[in-house]
Image (spheres, rainbow, N blue to C red):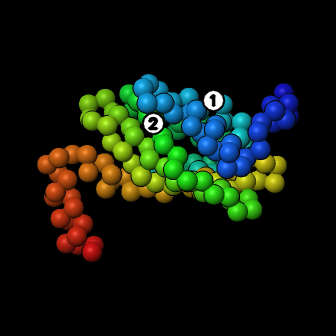
Amino acid sequence: MENNQKAILKPLDIDTIYSEWSKTYNKEGKPDWSHIFPYYHEDIKFHDSIQKINGLVPFKAMCARLTKRCRSLHMEILNVTKNNNIIMFEWIMTMKFRIFPSTPMYGSSRLTIHENGQIIEQRDYYDIWGDINNGIPIYRRFYRWFMRAFFG
């Protein structure tokens, strides 16, 4: 069945990222990744600011944890480029947690495409602490002062 499933997938290109990844997230409610999981290779390597994950089963579990933690999750895809087997896209992800206000995070993803057409590696880049701390009114000033004073 997996070969049939791969056969009906759109090729991974700029248009597919815009169309399929935009369906994943919505402004209200939980995301649904089920339609993009077939684009991921069973040996996917995922890496972001928090974790490194190897394999499709742990990757799906990570997505389920994020869904459970957020009341809603929305992603706006801003730019997508492709060069050979690398796709880069820039995004704004807005998460609403149980007790905190909506928090926009600005980032990008680099997808490496395997020779079979599936994503073999995904590296997400974002500043989790800066974006989250910007959403906390009193702490925001302290955090920005601290970063300027000690790092720039």
Give the structural element (helix, strand or loop) at label 1: loop
Which amino acid is tagged 2?
His
Q: Residue at x 60, y 39 (%)?
A: 21
**Up/down of 63 relative to 88, above or below:** above
Q: Is residue 68 visible?
A: no
The residue wearing badge 1 is 34
Q: Position of residue 101 (x, y in %)?
A: 27, 35
Residue 85 located left or right of residue 24: right
* The N terminus: image quadrant: top right
Which amino acid is tagged 1?
Ser
The residue wearing badge 2 is 74
Give the structural element (helix, strand or loop) at label 2: strand
Q: Position of residue 97 (x, y in %)?
A: 33, 33
Residue 115 located left or right of residue 17: right
* The C terminus: image quadrant: bottom left
Q: Residue furthest top?
A: 29
Q: Earlier in the sequence, mark 1 or mark 2?
A: 1
Which of the pair 15/50 is nearer the observer?
15
Which of the pair 114/57 is nearer the observer?
114
Q: Is residue 33 visible?
A: yes
Give the total number of marks visible in the rendering. Answer: 2
Q: Residue furthest bottom?
A: 152
Quarter of the image for residue 130 reads bottom left
**Up/down of 84 relative to 78, above or below:** below
Residue 137 located left or right of residue 103: left
Q: Position of residue 140 (x, y in %)?
A: 20, 53
**Up/down of 1 relative to 41, above or below:** above
What number is the disc on residue 135? Answer: none
Gap in angstroms between the C-alphas marked 1 and 2 = 16 Å
Q: Residue at x 45, y 36 (%)?
A: 74
For the residues labelled 1 and 2, say whether their Cβ atoms are less than 8 Å apart.
no
Which of the pair 115/8 is nearer the observer?
8
